[in-house]
Amino acid sequence: MERRQLGQGGPMVGAVALGTMNFMGTYGAADPRDSLAVIDACIEMGIDHIDTSDVYGAGGAETLLAPVLARHKGRVTIASKAGITRNPDHPFDNSPAYLRAALEGSLRRMGVERIDLYYLHRREAARPVEEAMEALMRLRDEGKIGAIGLSEVAPATLERACAVGPVAAVQSEYSLWSRQVELGMTDACARHGAALVAFSPLGRGVFGDAPPDPAGFAPGDLRITMPRFQPENWARNLPRLRAFGDWARDRGECPAAVAIAWVLSRAPHVIALPGSRSLDHWRQIARGAALRLDAAALDQIDRLLPAGWAHGPRYGQAMAVGPEGWS
């Protein structure tokens, strides 16, 4: 698999990373044994950058990864995050004490002494980002983390953070139906030497072999709350998704591979971060990492799915609290 640098001076990792939120039942029930088998297979494919968080499954995703990291010691770059509390009265906490305690919990659950990349999962608006950066830099200087990342921030926040210390990566949603990062974040990451880690590059399943049927979403499926999957918006989004899928198949490719290839084509510092429990899907994703789209193909994709085509914001009211700059 093609390799890309995880921040200025950072390690080289696969152009595709593995997200673990999906293994915690975010889109339906998941069997831990099947999840572990998929993760092991992905590592053998060269997908050696694994991303998790202390809030995925209330720490369950990190616990799930412990045997994987033990088996593949030295072969995996691990990233985790902290800053979301799940306390409705205080949903985000970037205080030094909270970040330190959260990190210690993550280290314990994963059975490691150091996390290669540690993100501020959400910025606490009432607290200067500089204070959080100073706290994370102390953890880095103690050897508990290797590098610092930010998640769902605006370019101005990245600029302020980088004035305090280096930021290795910014994690933002980026796909053929979520292109808000093109309004400055892609360029800001390039200026500051940060990787742009594009989560949900397959649009939460819409670029699969067939678009999902929202009417069949299981109870607890995160997408139930997302406006783009609501009936009025979905009726407008589905025809374009089907047209894109038909176009990809006419070229002899699956939609997922083309969607991944498109994300990776945007800039050399972009790393795709999908999450799937299906090994077949991961084979398609790996195919996308090797697929090169020429100018004619990119132009055709832009005509099928122009910037801003998707109806509905990407988050509902509750989830829109926290991400900076756009919903």
Image (cartoon, rainbow, N blue to C red):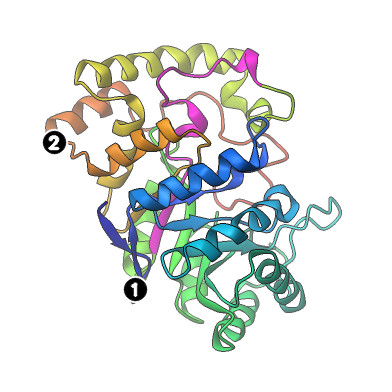
Residue drawn at x 29%, y 60% is 4
Q: Position of 152 compared to 57: left or right?
A: left
* 311, 75: nearer the viewer: 75
Q: Position of 131 compared to 192: left or right?
A: right
Residue 312, relative to residue 136: is it above or below? above
Q: Position of 241 compared to 150: left or right?
A: left
Residue 205 magenta-highlighted? yes
Residue 173, relative to residue 144: is it above or below? above
Indicate the amino acid at tag 1: Gln
The x, y position of residue 236, in whole percent, is: 48, 14
The x, y position of residue 65, in whole percent, is: 59, 56
Residue range of the region highlighted in magenta in the rendering: 195-217
Eye-nearest disc, 2 or 1? 1
The x, y position of residue 204, in whole percent, is: 52, 33
Q: Return the residue at label 2.
A: 295
Quadrant containing the C terminus is top right
Disc on the earlier residue, 2 or 1 = 1
Q: Return the residue at label 1.
A: 8
**What is the quadrant of residue 31 in the picture?**
top right
Q: Helix, strand or loop at disc 1?
A: loop
* 50, 33: nearer the viewer: 33
**What is the quadrant of residue 89 in the picture?**
bottom right
Q: Is residue 215 visible?
A: yes
Q: Residues within 10 Å of mark 1 (few under 14, many from 20)?
A: some
**What is the quadrant of residue 221 in the picture?**
top right
